[in-house]
Image (cartoon, helix red, strand yellow):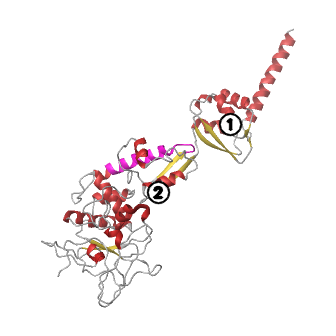
Amino acid sequence: MRRLVSTIFLLAALAVLGVGGWGLWWVHQPLRFAGPTADLSIEPGTLPRGVAQAVNDAGVDVQPQLLYWWFRVSGQGRSIKAGSYELEAGITPFGLLAKLARGEETLRAVTLVEGWTFRQFRSALQKEEGLKPDTKGLADEAVMTLLGRQGVHPEGRFFPDTYNYAKGSSDVAVLRRAMRAMDRRLTAAWAQRSPQAVVKTPDEALILASIVEKETGKAADRPFVSAVFNNRLRAGMPLQTDPTVIYGMGAAFDGNLRKKDLLADGPWNTYTRPGLPPTPIAMPGRASLFAAVQPAPSQALYFVARGDGSSQFSSHLDEPHPPGRRPVHPLRGHRRRRQVQPHRAPGRRAARARPGRGADARTWRHAPGRAVAHFGPEPADGRAHRGLADVRGTARPPAAGDRAGARPR
């Protein structure tokens, strides 16, 4: 009898060892996949048994009961985290459990580019296959309400950066992260504003930063571009910046900014209206935010392109521009041909830019009897190098108390 009991005990021990050995071998064997990868989605609250079934349903050839047994025996079944996972062929049950317990979700990324508009950002989100388009079909106002900013214009309220997200995430989550990031960046910049900045509120700083973003061709020029606009605002001079007009035109802008566009009054037309536009015109980056509140120590009121992406700044229109360069106003992000004609002598036609010629198609050549067409803001006395007097073809009378920096008579 004792021998029989010993034999049974021995056989049982061998069986346990055999099963244990086979289990140890199995958890380190690659699982078989129906394809090269499998997308696994685990909803919050899913129990280990449901996770094992979800793995099988995702295209992994494994017995759910066996996988569930492994989850329980390991003691980590309750540590599995909800999320979206991409499983690659060759993964073992051991590696699968480790991945799920650590919550190593498959992250994708979407990038908001500096200078983009809110419309461009929404378009980029809609093209992301891994994002749930919860805002699709919603008006901008409805999106802002969904984000808890009812009545706030969306332009400029989202910080340009690269945002990671798990497959299956809502686009609302990405928008909310970008919005909060801009809140933090704007607060940080406003806290470090200099006495030379004329903007009175963080919202005004955001508007000016968006203009600096669109008007800067080279990073080092941002504080000087900001100085030009700060100086003009301080002097009560119109900003006269093309990007604001283009933004106000919306879908009507076809790549060419014409005389009638500059004459058409609107909230964002800084040729016909003084001060800042009512809203930002783009998403400014960190450098533009700080440039708006920390302008360079400069008295410049104008700037012209050098041809290498940088600009030359001046406080007088009659200061010499770079040799061989025709003064232009750099407008990053827009390829267009200037249509506005400069002053011309009687009987002479003003030379227009021809697409594809030179480093910048938005230029005019020097010619006897015809003034060079200058770009940039307009001085206080009305002698605008690209102002309303130019586009109308008539000079305005000088203003009383001409400011320093205006062209002498």
Q: Is residue 234 visible to us here? A: yes
**On the rendered structure, is 255 left or right of 318?**
right
Q: Examine the structure image and report whether residue 295 is included in the region drawn in magenta.
A: no
Element marked by disc 2: helix
Q: Name the residue at 23% across, 53% down.
A: 200
How far from the left and from the top, in percent, is residue 330?
A: 37, 71
- Number of callouts in the render? 2
Residue 55, disc? 1
Mark 2–mark 1 distance (CA, rounded to whole Å): 37 Å
Q: Mark 2 points at which residue?
A: 120
Point out the tag, 2 or 1, that comes first from the N-terminus. Answer: 1
The boundaries of the magenta stretch are 166-187
Three-letter residue code for mark 2: Gln
How far from the left and from the top, in percent, is residue 84?
A: 59, 41
**On the rendered structure, is 71 left or right of 15?**
left
Residue 300 occupies which quadrant of the picture? Answer: bottom left
State which quarter of the image contains the C terminus. Answer: bottom left
